[in-house]
Each structure stands twice: as C-alpha cells, then as structure tokens.
C-alpha cells in the first residue's frame, strides 16, 4: 500500500469515526437555504440568483469544513508521527485534499437536492450532467485551496479566522466561474447550454493552484 | 546599503512625479464626457499597475527566501508587500473617485481592474495579521513566504478571470486603457514612471530603516542589554 | 560527502550545535559523539533544552548552527535518508486518539514499509493485544505511553530517542518496555542523575549550554572520543 493511500484511508476513517466535518457542512447548507428564503423573501429562485445562492452556500460550508481539516493532526502531535516517516511529504497534502474533495461531494449529495426542493423554481432543473461537471471541477479547486489555506492557518493563533479570510479571496475565481457556469443550467425557461468556457477556467484554476500548493506545502511542515 | 543613492533617487522621483502632475493638469486634453476628474486616471492606473507588480515582486522575493533560507529575502518580500498595500489603498481611493466622476457612483463593478484589485487587496490585507499570528520568527517568515508565493501567483489568475466575467463592460471604460490618443499616452507613461520611482524609493527607505533598526538591536545585544522582542509582524 | 554506512560510524556526531527560538537560545554549542550501541543520557532541569536536542536529532527541527550527523548523514540535508531508521518517543504520543491502537500502528507500519505481523508482535510485546481494537481516547495514560513505545520501535530503528520514557508508566509497565529498548543505540533524557550511571556518554544541559551536573562530567566512550561537554565553564561561556 502506498503512503498516499494509507494516509487517505486514515483521513476517511477518522472522519467516519468522529463525523465532525461532513454532517456539520451538510446541515449548515440546508439551514442556509432556509436563511436565504427569508433573507431574499422569495419562494423560488432561478437563473443567476439561483446559481449565486447555491454557490455562496457551498463555499461557506466549505470554509466551515476547512477549519476542521488539521485538527486531529494537531492533537497529541499525531502529525509529527507522520513527519518522522520516510515518505514524500507531498502525500500528506494530496491525501488531505482528496479527502476534502470527497467530503464536499458527500455534502453536495445532500445539499443540491435540498436546494432543488426548497428554493429552485418549478420549471428550472434538469441538466444534471452539466451540473455534475461544474460541481466536480469546482470541488477540486475548493479542496486544493482549502487544504492549502488550512495548512497555513492551522498552527497560528487565529486559525478559524484566517482560513476564511485567506480562503475566500483565493476562491473568488472559483465562485465567479462556477456561478457563471451554473446560471444557464438553472434558468427559469429550462436548462440552457453549459458554457464550456467557464469549465475551462475552473480547470485552469485547479491546475495552477494544485501545482503551486504541491510546490510550497512542504515548507509549511518543516521546522 | 540601501541608503546609497537614496537622495538622487528621491530627487528623481520628485521631479518625475511633479512632471507627471503638471502634464496631467495642463498638457493632457480634457475628456469630453468625464470632465476634469477623469484626470485622476493618470494616478489610478499607474498606481494599480505598480502595486500589482509589487505584489508579484513580493512573491519572487519569497521564492528566493524559501530556496536559500536567507532571511533578508523575507525582509524584502515583507517591505514589497507592505508598500504595495499602501499604494493599493491609494488605488482603491482614486478608483472610487474616478468611478464617481465617470458614472456618479462611488464604485464600479464594470471596471475589471478595480474589481480584481479589490479582491487582491482583501487577500493581501491578511498578510500582516497572518505574520502577527505566528510567534516563532523562523516559522513566521516561512509561512509568510508561502503565502506571498500563493498570493503572487493568484494575482494574474484572478485578473484574467475577473476580466472574463466583466466582458460586457461599458466600452468607454475599456477604451480608457487601450485606445488612448498620443498626448494621453505620454502623460500616462510619465506618470507610470513616476509611480515606479516612488515605489522603489519608498521601498529602499523602508529597507534602510529596517536594516538600521536591526543593526542597533544587534549592537545592543552584544553590549549585553536584554533585548526582548515583543510579538511583531515585521521580520527582524 | 556520504560516508559508507558501517558499524564504525558513530550514531551521532555533534559539533557546536545551535538552535534558537527567535532571539532566545535553546541550544548553544553542543558537541559530542555517540558510538553505535551506546547509550547517551541527557540530564538537566526543565527548560534546559533536552527536548529540543532530541527533536533536532529526530529531524523534526533543523539545526541553526554547527554540524549534526546522525547515523552518518548530515542534517538537515540528509534527513530524508535517515528518517526511517530513527525512533522517537516524545512528550506527546504522536498517535491519533480517535483511532485504535492497532489502526495507529498499522498506519505507522505502512508508512515505514514494515510487515503487518510486526504490528501484532508489538501489541503483544507491550501487552495491549486485548485492547488493540479500542480507540486510544479510552486508554489510560500508561497504556497510551506503551502504545507510543510500540510505535517508536515498530520499524526496528538503528537509533532510538527517548524523551523521559518512564513518564506515565508504573513500574510493571516500565518493566514491559525495557526489553524493547535494550541493546539499541539510544538517547535518553532524564531529571535523574542515577540514569547517568548506566550510560556510556553523559551530557548535562542548563539553559541550552553544556554544563556539569552534580559533579558529573561526560564519561569517555569506548572509542576514546571524549565529548567536549566537560570543557564548558560554569556559566556556559566558551
């Protein structure tokens, strides 16, 4: 078994055991939809407004989850146990990012149907493959950036604040692209075409952030 | 080391900036629609460009710091970002004034430079709080460098995405950056030069000041005085 | 320049090791040599730098000055080469409290590329087989410490670094772990000068500086290399 898969299994097992991040993120999402209902004073949204509500909610839920990413490693010096092993430390980042992306996917399995039920207008909807593509690419971007920022903030004093303060500006391109891409899919008159351009932007973002994170993450672990 | 030639540099900066202001006020043609306040464009765009370049320079210094472990690169990175933040405030303020002059609103979502700049500014505004939140100076420098590299790479990516998003922009604002008549170009270039010189001069002033302070601390420590450093966001 | 690994290469060679925390000195000019198979006892009061020294040797901290050679490799450049051959027992267990003892040791085994059977052997050796499937947060401190010792020697390291190994252990448990550490090249920190009696090399530390403790000086190792700890004066000046 490679170090990466051993670490990934550890991440998933820990989350399953403690159930800290995923249920909270899912619950937060659904609650936020209700908040939007009252805040916007609408029964249904479509088009750009729908895309906005969906992505803002998912983004803030992701920030909530990112706060918890390195908590179990900081207790009892567990992270150091891994740093002592003769492995490529990039595997640590990769395992965490993959796990975070998995958590986001699970949360979306709950949140997106809830969104459809609670807030989406009656004629909007469908276009599931397009939506899945956007969700997938955006999740990768959020996971890559979220893990990097969480690693940066975790050993500082104001950890929770810094994750959001750093993460939200860095994720702005993701929300721009994801919202633009999702808007025609949620149009009131029925789903339109998926703008491939914005998918390309998401892919580019994922690539750039991924490469940079792989290059610099090691420096966060050294002392 | 940074104090050498500072006087010449300062004079050159002052001259260039004065020249740029004079050109902007008297030589550049008055814009038909936007009126006199449009001339703040000659302040706003150069400030934005220099500021963004400064952020990227901060990232480059950070790369050097991580590769060599030499803390002086970290100091350069810190000062570069610091200066860029100051110019950044100026950019946002002048941008707001320009928006008011053009459109009557204090903010323009249509202007991609302004919007992407706001995002970048919000990001870099966390640089000092991040440094302040880490007590160990070595780790502070290292984490700050990681941040500066990520943020520096983010600047062009962000600009590109925001620009794509605002592509239905009002033509007038776009033309302000690309289809300039000859006289406007001249003033713009001089102004850009002046801003760059201003940035470099201020950068060297702050580097010199920090170096002097660092040397004083070293001397005091050698004399045996108990130099206890309080928590600080600045590199030491 | 890599030296060929041999049993003659000392396990540890320090020359003027320095480590700072900001402007405060954590370790100031520590020099010593530890031959293979020998035991180094590091004594000193709290805050003397004993834990810092061990963490530098464990490759968890980089040296800020001087030279450090562990198992023939220079640190920090050669750290990646020796990581798998060092076992470190620190103040913290370095384990995940929400995983079971077996899961923790299995993770360790996979990362160190050690066979799974070793995990069962170690659980048996430290007497945790019966509770192996229970999460660590249900363990007493003594049991956690025993699991931590298992983690430390699971990959059969050439050098073992022990930061107050007998903390949290009752005498029976201390007896259980003793045979696991016997015969290995090791570094032990302690408050107790009696631990120095069983060591081949002794280092006293006070506020980061090598320092004589209770009249004890560094005992010359069999190889005849006398660590320079005894040349420091009382206040640590060179």
Image (tube, rainbow, N blue to C red):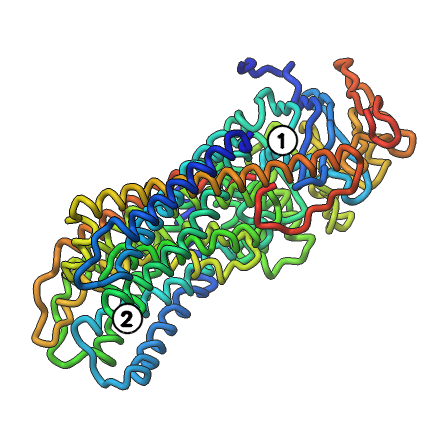
Please name the residue shown 79% across and 38% down the image: C207
Report, in whole angstroms, how far the alpha carbon at label 1 lies from the one at label 2.
57 Å
Q: How crowded is mark 2: few (under 14 residues within 10 Å), some or many (20 or more)?
A: few
Give the residue at mark 2: B105
Is A174 left, or right, of C70 in this rendering? Answer: left
Q: Position of residue C89 (x, y in %)?
A: 65, 41
Q: Which residue is drawn at 27% across and 46% down?
A: B188
Task: Tell me whether the residue at label 1 lies in contact with that at label 2, contact meaning CB atoms closer than 8 angstroms.
Answer: no
Badge 1 and badge 2 in a common chain = no
Q: Nearer the viewer, mark 1 or mark 2?
A: 2
Whether residue B19 is situated above or below residue A26 in the rendered picture: above
Determine whether the residue tagged by mark 1 lies in a helix, strand or loop.
Answer: loop
| Residue depicted at x 40% and y 62% | A63
Is residue B42 in view?
yes
| A192 versus A169 height, above or below | below
Q: Which circle marks residue B195 in the picture?
A: none
Q: How many marks?
A: 2
Q: Residue C190: which quarter of the image?
A: top right
Quadrant of the rendered structure where residue A65 is? bottom left
Q: In this view, does C183 lie above or below C144?
A: above
Q: Name the residue under label 1.
A: C63
Q: Position of residue B57 (x, y in %)?
A: 40, 39
- In front: A175, or A124? A175
In the rendered view, does C76 fall on the left or right side of A190?
right
In the displayed structure image, the side of residue A194 where residue B2 appears, left or right: right
Image quarter where the C terminus of chain A lies is top right
Residue A50: give x, y in percent of width and height: 21, 73
Judged from this view, the residue extending furthest toward the right is C215
Kindly identify which chain the residue marked by label 2 belongs to.
B
């Amino acid at each position: 078994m490679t170090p990466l898969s051993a670490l990934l299994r550890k991440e998933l097992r820990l989350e399953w055991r403690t159930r800290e991040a995923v249920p909270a993120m899912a619950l937060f999402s659904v609650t936020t939809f209700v908040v939007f209902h009252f805040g916007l004073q609408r029964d249904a949204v479509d088009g750009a407004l729908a895309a906005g509500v969906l992505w803002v909610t998912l983004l803030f839920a992701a920030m909530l989850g990112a706060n918890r990413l390195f908590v179990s490693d900081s207790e009892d010096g567990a992270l150091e146990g891994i740093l002592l092993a003769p492995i490529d430390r990039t595997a640590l980042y990769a395992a965490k990012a993959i796990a975070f992306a998995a958590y986001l996917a699970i949360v979306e399995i709950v949140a997106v149907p809830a969104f459809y039920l609670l807030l989406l207008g009656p004629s909007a909807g469908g276009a599931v493959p397009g939506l899945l593509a956007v969700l997938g690419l955006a999740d990768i971007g959020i996971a890559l950036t979220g893990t990097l920022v969480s690693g940066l903030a975790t050993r500082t004093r104001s950890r929770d604040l810094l994750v959001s303060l750093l993460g939200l500006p860095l994720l702005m391109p993701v929300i721009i692209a994801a919202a633009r891409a999702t808007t025609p899919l949620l149009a009131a008159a029925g789903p339109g075409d998926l703008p491939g351009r914005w998918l390309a932007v998401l892919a580019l973002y994922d690539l750039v952030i991924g490469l940079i994170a792989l290059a610099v993450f090691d420096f966060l672990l050294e002392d | 080391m940074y104090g050498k030639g500072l006087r010449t540099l300062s004079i050159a900066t002052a001259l260039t900036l004065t020249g740029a202001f004079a050109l902007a006020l008297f030589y550049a043609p008055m814009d038909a629609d936007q009126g006199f306040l449009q001339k703040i464009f000659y302040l706003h765009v150069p400030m934005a460009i220099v500021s963004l370049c400064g952020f990227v320079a901060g990232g480059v210094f950070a790369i050097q710091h991580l590769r060599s472990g030499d803390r002086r690169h970290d100091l350069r990175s810190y000062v570069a970002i610091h200066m860029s933040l100051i110019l950044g405030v100026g950019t946002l303020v002048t941008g707001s004034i320009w928006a008011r002059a053009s459109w009557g609103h204090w903010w323009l979502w249509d202007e991609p430079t302004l919007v992407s700049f706001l995002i970048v500014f919000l990001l870099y505004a966390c640089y000092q709080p991040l440094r302040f939140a880490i007590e160990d100076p070595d780790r502070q420098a290292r984490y700050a460098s990681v941040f500066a590299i990520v943020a520096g790479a983010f600047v062009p990516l962000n600009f590109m995405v925001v620009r794509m998003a605002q592509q239905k922009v009002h033509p007038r604002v776009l033309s302000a950056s690309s289809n300039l008549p000859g006289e406007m170009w001249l003033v713009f270039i001089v102004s850009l030069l002046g801003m760059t010189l201003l940035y470099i001069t201020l950068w060297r002033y702050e580097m010199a000041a920090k170096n002097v302070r660092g040397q004083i601390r070293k001397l005091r420590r050698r004399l045996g005085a108990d130099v206890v450093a309080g928590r600080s966001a600045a590199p030491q | 320049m890599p030296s060929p690994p041999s049993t003659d290469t000392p396990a540890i060679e320090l020359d003027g090791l320095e480590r700072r925390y900001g402007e405060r000195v954590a370790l100031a000019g520590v020099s010593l040599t530890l031959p293979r198979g020998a035991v180094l006892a590091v004594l000193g009061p709290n805050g003397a730098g004993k834990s810092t020294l061990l963490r530098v040797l464990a490759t968890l901290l980089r040296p800020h000055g001087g030279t450090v050679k562990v198992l023939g490799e220079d640190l920090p450049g050669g750290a990646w080469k020796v990581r798998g051959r060092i076992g470190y027992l620190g103040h913290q267990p370095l384990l995940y409290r929400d995983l079971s003892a077996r899961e923790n040791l299995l993770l360790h085994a996979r990362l160190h590329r050690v066979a799974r059977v070793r995990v069962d052997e170690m659980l048996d050796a430290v007497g945790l087989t019966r509770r192996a499937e229970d999460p660590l947060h249900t363990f007493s401190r003594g049991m956690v410490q025993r699991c931590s010792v298992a983690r430390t020697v699971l990959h059969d390291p050439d050098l073992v670094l022990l930061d107050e190994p007998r903390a949290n252990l009752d005498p029976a448990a201390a007896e259980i772990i003793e045979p696991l550490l016997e015969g290995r090249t090791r570094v032990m920190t302690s408050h107790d000068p009696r631990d120095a009696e069983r060591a081949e090399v002794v280092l006293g530390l006070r506020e980061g500086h090598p320092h004589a403790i209770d009249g004890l000086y560094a005992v010359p190792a069999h190889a005849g290399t006398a660590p320079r700890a005894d040349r420091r004066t009382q206040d640590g000046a060179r």
